[in-house]
Amino acid sequence: MGLLTATAAVATMGDPKTFSSGREFAAWLGLVPRQTGTGGKLRLHGISKRGDVYLRTLLIHGARSVLARTKEPGPWIEQLRRRRPNNVVTVALANKLARTIWALLAHDRKYEKAHVSVRPV
């Protein structure tokens, strides 16, 4: 992630503690599927496109760049690429980037590639 995306994320988010989770932050940006359903059947549609258009665009273009330039993006992305179209994979990676941004800012940590999140029991 570059300086432009990082500063836009901090400026847009404000206080990261206002969001209870990374998923809530990603949903606020419009990076999660819109859901409708009735009778227990849930239907997932395209991304909701709510929230800050500028930051969402930066995250999606950043994800697209990672997918185009990285030779070995990792097993998660490779498995997703086998099952889903390229644009869905791009938005999924942008969603993951948004959640990572929230986690780093909310918990005041530096990025560690090998970091594994563990839920308290």
Image (spheres, rainbow, N blue to C red):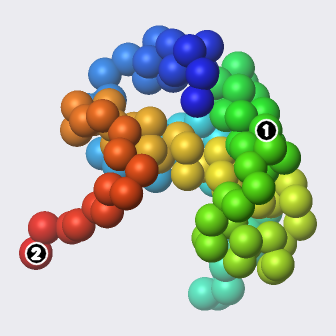
The residue under label 1 is 65
Q: Amino acid at mark 1?
A: Ser
- Say whether disc 2 or disc 1 marks the residue closer to the N-terminus: 1
Mark 2 or 1, closer to the camera:
1
Q: Amino acid at mark 2?
A: Val
Residue 78 position within the rendered picture, expressed as x and y whole percent measured from the top left: 73, 71
Quick one: quadrant of the N terminus?
top right
The residue under label 2 is 121
The answer to whether residue 12 is visible is no
Q: Residue at 89% of width from left, 66% of height from top?
A: 85
Q: How many marks on residues? A: 2
Residue with the most extreme left position:
121
The answer to whether residue 76 is visible is yes
Q: Residue at 38% of width from left, 17% of height from top?
A: 14
Around disc 2, counting alpha carbons within 10 Å, would you say few (fewer than 14), some (14 to 19), or many (20 or more)?
few
**Picture layout, residue 84 above or below residue 92:** below
Q: Residue at 55% of width from left, 44% of height from top?
A: 97
